[in-house]
Amino acid sequence: MIGFPVALIFANGVEWYAHKYILHGTPRPGKPRYSPVPKSMKSHWQHHKIVRTTDYRDEGYEEGLSNWRTRNEVTSLLALTAVTSLALPVAPFFTLGTYYAAGRYFYVHRRSHLEPEWGKKAIPWHYDHHMNTNQDANWCVTRPWFDYIMGTRIKANPELAESNPLGINLPSIIENPMNRFLNKCFPQLRMNQQG
């Protein structure tokens, strides 16, 4: 059963890595960005352009699979879960966790761009990714875990930002001591201090 939470952490790491290196591509001096999957990078940059001109909304998600960008996202998620399916005989909970993570990624990402006010409040780190002046930061979508681990979480508006690095609403009796501990051990996290 430990495989399920391990899968969620693994999936968040894959989400961070894929977003940074595959969807955005690696900048190269004097050359276009490099991605090992150029079609995914092209799709993602079109998504960025649309979102920047429509105040975070992407109506392509309303079209469903007839929209090539949505189809590309779903195909990529299915390909990733096909790979993790290889672990099913030896790590069934891990594999199920990756299925859950892929489904949750699509649901959260889609909903945030169809309901911008929900997205701004529910996943402010992704809103910052698109609407901040620096679009080469805040790589996570579902939870900001790896952005904090890798030091890539940049808050455009601290009042709208998540109140802890888990990106989960927690009671203040848990959140405040956790944030104090994290601030002490990892000052670069700069979490909100309350209480």
Image (spheres, grey):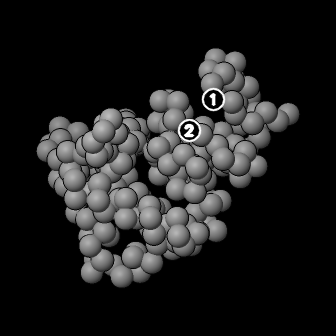
Give the residue at x 66% y 47%.
156
Residue sitting nearer the eye, 33 or 114? 33
Residue denoted by label 1:
189
User: Crowding near pointer 1: few (<14 within 10 Å), some, many (20+)?
Assistant: many
In this picture, residue 118 sits left or right of residue 85: right
Q: What element carries label 1?
A: helix
Give the residue at x 63% y 29%.
189
Residue 107 position within the rendered picture, expressed as x and y whole percent measured from the top left: 43, 65
Residue 128 drawn above or below residue 172: below
Residue denoted by label 2:
153
Residue 168 position within the rendered picture, expressed as x and y whole percent measured from the top left: 61, 47
Residue 16 position within the rendered picture, expressed as x and y whole percent measured from the top left: 40, 42
Give the residue at x 75% y 36%.
192
Q: What element carries label 2?
A: loop
- For the N terminus, the image quarter is top left
Give the residue at x 22% y 59%.
39
Asked whether residue 94 is in view, the answer is: no
In this picture, residue 178 sits left or right of residue 115: right
Cβ atoms under marks 2 and 1 closer than 8 Å: yes
Residue 42 position within the rendered picture, expressed as x and y whole percent measured from the top left: 29, 59
In this picture, residue 131 sits left or right of residue 100: right
User: Crowding near pointer 2: few (<14 within 10 Å), some, many (20+)?
Assistant: many
